[in-house]
Structure formats: C-alpha cells, structure tokens
Image (spheres, rainbow, N blue to C red):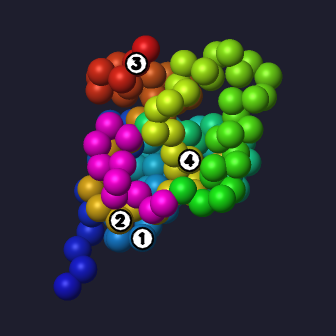
Amino acid sequence: MTEKIPCRINGKEILVWPGYRLWDAALDADAKLWQWCGGHGQCTTCAVIPVSGGENLSAPTGLEKFSIRLWFAKPLAAIRRRWKGRPIRLACQAYVQGPVDVVGLFGKTAKAARAASGLDT
Ligand code: FES
C-alpha cells in the first residue's frame, strides 16, 4: 500500500503522494516559494536547495538543466553565482519520490528557512 511522503519546504511540512510535484506541495503548504512563470520551468524563481533528501526528487529534466544554466548567465548573474556548485533544483520540475526537505532561494520566508537550516551564505 502506498503511503504519503513527508515533505518540508521553507520549513512548512506537508504529506504528499509519491510523484506529487514539489511546486504543488509548496503551494499546498503555503511555503511562500516564488513562482513568477506559473510553474513552467522558465523563470527559475522556484529554485530550491535540498537540505536533505535531494536524492528523493525526480531527475532534473532537460528544461530544468537548461533554465538553471541560463540562470547563471542572466543579468545579476554575479549575485546568483554564490549558489553555483550547489544542487539547485526547480520545484516546478521536480517530483517527490521520498522524504525531502528543501529551502527556496528567493524571498524573506526562504531566507529565514535557509538561516534556520544553516544554509544561508
Ligand atoms: S515557477 Fe518559474 S521556473 Fe518554476
């Protein structure tokens, strides 16, 4: 029997079915994850860093890899470079396959969650 999976986004906890999109879980949990393009993998504002369980997310899609590569080349890339080398994922392109804890990169809620997780730099 399939059971729901614990998912934590910006410190907000929610149980989701396996295969549920991380982005939808963030909306359901009111995790205040940014989402300018409406979950289409283009704006990268839903970018997250796994605190734990990153291996429990689906493999990055081609669109996700492309958008993140582009992200580091866009204006203000100097600001984004502090995240380079981190296992950044786009919540709208990642599907939950096991317990996961992630924090966002943008917004006050994400900043507080990163600090609480010891990930703020
Ligand atoms: S919401 Fe725009 S890339 Fe995910």
**Magenta residues?**
50-59
Query: Which residue is label 1 attached to?
Result: 19
- Is residue 54 a member of the stretch shown in magenta? yes
> Which structural element holds mark 2?
loop
C-alpha span from label 3 to label 2: 26 Å
Which residue is painted at 48% across and 60% down in the image?
59
C-alpha span from label 4 to label 2: 15 Å
For label 4, count other residues whose C-alpha is less than 10 Å away and answer few (under 14), some (14-19) or many (20+).
many
Query: Which residue is label 4 attached to?
Result: 90
Query: Which residue is label 3 attached to?
Result: 120
Query: Which residue is label 2 attached to?
Result: 97
Quick one: 67 or 44, which is closer to the camera? Answer: 67
> Which structural element holds mark 4?
strand
Give the side of residue 19 with respect to residue 93, left or right: left
Which residue is painted at 29% across and 61% down in the image?
98
Residue 111 at x, y = what percent? 45, 22
- Is residue 70 a member of the stretch shown in magenta? no
Q: Please say if the residues under marks 3 and 1 sit with CB atoms less than 8 Å apart.
A: no
Q: Is mark 4 within 8 Å of ligand 1?
A: yes
